[in-house]
Amino acid sequence: MRDIDGDGLPDAVITEGSAACYGMTGQSFWLVSKQAGGTWKLVFNEVAVPTFLPRRTPTGWPDVELGGPGFCFPVWRWNGRAYALNRFQYEGKPCRPNR
């Protein structure tokens, strides 16, 4: 738990791991943010291993690389309302996923 977006309120990343539930990725996560009124809000969740990147949006949320099996990972960016797919990368360099 820490202040991920820089708003002075705590945020938390909750993870759960299980190959039976989450396949080869083996993990799911939930990013939640404490609100001014004391409630918690779900910000983002996926079946993936999250890596919070240094680049931040103007509202403070970092880009999130979603790891798992393979060599080309999606990076999601906060658009002001939700996280949305922004690009794919491997070791910080652009790539195209095999589909």
Image (cartoon, grey):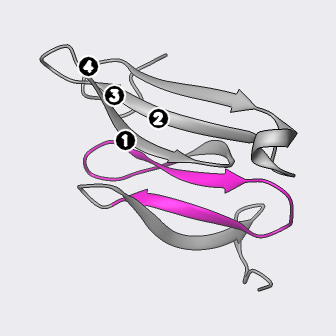
Residues at badges 2 and 1 in contact (C-beta under 8 Å)? yes
**Mark 4 or mark 2, whichever is nearer to me:** 2
The image shows residue 16, relative to residue 54, as above or below, that is above
Q: Are the two marked residues, 3 and 1, in contact with CB atoms closer than 8 angstroms?
A: yes
- Amino acid type at mark 2: Leu
Q: Position of residue 58 (x, y in %)?
A: 26, 51
Please tell me whether residue 27 is drawn above or below residue 83 in the rendered image: above
Between discs 3 and 1, the one toward the N terminus: 3
Please give the residue where the numbered disc 1 appears in the rendered image: 43
Q: Which residue is mark 2?
A: 31
Identify which residue is drawn at 76% across, 31% down: 17
- Residue type at mark 4 is Gly
Does the CB distance between marks 1 and 4 fall below 8 Å? no
Label 2 close to label 3 by CB (< 8 Å)? yes
**What residue is disc 4 on?**
8
Give the mark toward the camera: 1 or 4.
1
Could you tell me the amino acid type at mark 1?
Val
* Mark 3: amino acid: Ser
Separation (CA) of disc 2 from disc 1: 5 Å
State which region is magenta: 54-78
